[in-house]
Each structure stands twice: as C-alpha cells, then as structure tokens.
C-alpha cells in the first residue's frame, strides 16, 4: 500500500467535502469553499450527509444482529470517520470480516484507519473501481467466503456510475456472486423534494445570479452542476422508482425503499425525522 499517494489540495474532492459536511477534519480550504457553495444552493445536503451516515450504522447493525451476517463488502468506502462499517459490525459480532473497496488515492492514504480489527475478525482494503466488479470480487475472495452470506454495501456510489456505464449491469454482476441469505444495502441520491437556496448560489436571497433557477431544475441539480464546474466529480441523481428497481428479484425488508432518514430511525422524542433527497433499501438474496 503506498505510503503517500499524490494528493492535490488545490482541487475540491468529494470525499473531503463529505468529510467537511460530517464535521470531520480531513479537508482543505478548497473543499470547505466548494462545500459551502453547494450548501448555499442546496441547504439540505448537510442533512443528507448526516442521515446517510446514520443509515449506514443502522443497516450494518441490522445485518450483523438480526440478519446474522458476518461478512461485509463495502464498495465506495469514502474517508474513514466515526463508526465505520467494521466498527459497527464488530461491535455486534467481533468475528465479522470486512472488505473495503475504493479507487481514490485520498481514501487509500487513510486506509490504515480502516484496517483496525478485533482479534477475532478481519478487515482489508482493495484499491479498485466499481466499474470493474469482476476484479473486486476476485480480490475480495481473499478475505470473504462467497459460498456463505455476505452483506454488500453500495452507499452513495451508484450515482457516480453513468447510465452509459450501466449501473444495473454492474449491480447484477455483484449480486450474482452472492450466496442465498446475503443482503444488499443501497443508498443513492434523488431530486424528489427539491428545496434549496436563493437560486443564484450567492446566498443573498435575490435570485439574480447569472445561473438563476430554471423551472425544470431542482436546487440539488444546480448545486451538482456548480460543483462539477468547480472541478468535482459528477453525480447522477436517480428517481426513487429506479432505486427501487435495483432490488428487483430480491426480498426487500421493511420498510422498503424510503428516504435514508426514514429507514428504521432511532426513537426520538420530537417525532420522525424529515424526509431527505437520498433513498435507500435493504434486501435479502433469496
């Protein structure tokens, strides 16, 4: 594993921006600048980041607990933060084995934080791209036994796959490798609820910017477009119906495909959390 992969701190980076939205410290001024600009256009992004992270914890606790899963393949890992997949799983079942997958040199630079494990369990990291599922499965087999159930996590990663690259075909190849009794966990971005800032991204409320809102655009679509202009990686928002179709042929567990904030939320004294523009589901492989 390279000790110091080359990192350009002058270009915004999605993993570092998400780290910033999650109140992390692994980010640079350019990431904070672009992250703040995104949130000025689409204020709901911070809630999406935080609810998505909380969903990871609830889903992994369900898999390791109620579902009895002891192997996890987490593709699109992102930067290590509090309660990573192995920490949540091994807290429930110390013997859990976890393979993380990412193709990001920044994540690779921090991967040693993902390789801590209980003595009874195992964690490993694969430098690979989701667009090469065969390579991922071959390398993951060094740690995981695909003859036994595996929990496959695809959290916020399929949106980085374009329609031309066929996310459904990639998902099908991954799922086909899973034994019966495995589970698939998906979380991806939508633009159902819209919502956002003032329409021009300058935060002044006047909506008179040169790229003011058009009737056919949601705030999140505009925020992503500005983000790409700033040098970020494109993200493809997809409808809840298409995200639901990712689970075709699988057995969805309750409550089905819902906003990440509404998937088995923790009991709160002030009622259910708001709906956010990211949908998720957990399903069993029959």
Image: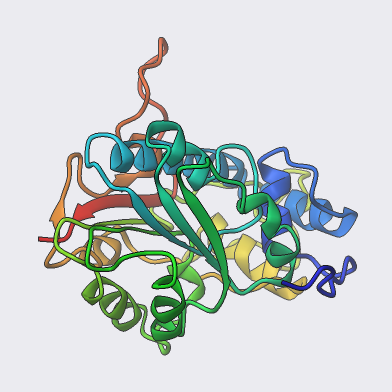
Q: Is residue 7 above or below residue 28?
A: below
Q: Residue at x 37, y 64 (%)?
A: 144
Q: Nearer the viewer, residue 158 or 147?
A: 147
**Left or right relative to 40: residue 173:** left
Q: Is residue 222 above or below residue 37?
A: below
Q: Residue at x 33, y 63 (%)?
A: 239
Q: Residue at x 62, y 52 (%)?
A: 114
Considering the image in quadrants, where does the N terminus appear?
bottom right
Residue 60: x %, y % from top left? 38, 42
Q: Nearer the viewer, residue 12 or 276?
A: 12
Residue 250: x %, y % from top left? 14, 61
**Left or right relative to 253: residue 218:** right
**Left or right relative to 15: residue 217:** left
Residue sitting farthest toward the top: 269
Residue 238: x %, y % from top left? 38, 66
Is residue 200 among what the camera can see? no
Is residue 99 among what the camera can see? yes
Q: Residue at x 74, y 41 (%)?
A: 24
Residue sitting farthest toward the bottom: 164
Considering the image in quadrants, where does the C terminus appear?
bottom left
Q: Can you tell which quarter of the image residue 243 is in? A: bottom left
| Marker count (numbered) | 0
């Amino acid at each position: 594993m390279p000790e110091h992969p080359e990192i350009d701190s002058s270009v915004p980076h999605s993993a570092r921006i998400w780290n910033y939205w999650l109140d992390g410290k692994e980010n640079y001024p350019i990431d904070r600048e672009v992250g703040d600009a995104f949130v000025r256009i689409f204020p709901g992004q911070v809630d999406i980041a935080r609810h998505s992270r909380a969903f990871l914890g609830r889903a992994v606790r369900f898999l390791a607990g109620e579902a009895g899963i002891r192997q996890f393949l987490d593709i699109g890992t992102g930067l290590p933060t509090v309660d990573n997949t192995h920490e949540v799983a091994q807290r429930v079942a110390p013997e859990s084995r976890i393979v993380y997958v990412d193709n990001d040199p920044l994540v690779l630079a921090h991967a040693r934080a993902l390789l801590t494990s209980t003595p009874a369990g195992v964690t490993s990291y694969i430098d690979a791209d989701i667009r090469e599922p065969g390579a991922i499965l071959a390398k993951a087999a060094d740690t995981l036994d695909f003859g036994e159930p595996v929990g496959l996590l695809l959290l916020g990663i399929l949106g980085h796959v374009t329609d031309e690259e066929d996310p459904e075909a990639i998902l099908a190849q991954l799922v086909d490798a899973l034994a019966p009794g495995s589970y698939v966990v998906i979380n991806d971005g939508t633009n159902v609820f819209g919502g956002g800032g003032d329409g021009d991204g300058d935060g002044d409320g006047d909506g008179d910017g040169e790229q003011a809102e058009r009737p056919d655009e949601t705030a999140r679509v505009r925020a992503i477009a500005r983000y790409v202009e700033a040098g970020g990686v494109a993200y493809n928002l997809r409808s809840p119906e298409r995200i639901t179709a990712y689970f075709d042929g699988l057995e969805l567990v309750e409550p089905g495909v819902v906003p990440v904030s509404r998937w088995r939320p923790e009991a709160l004294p002030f009622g259910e959390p708001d709906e956010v523009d990211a949908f998720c589901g957990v399903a069993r492989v029959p």
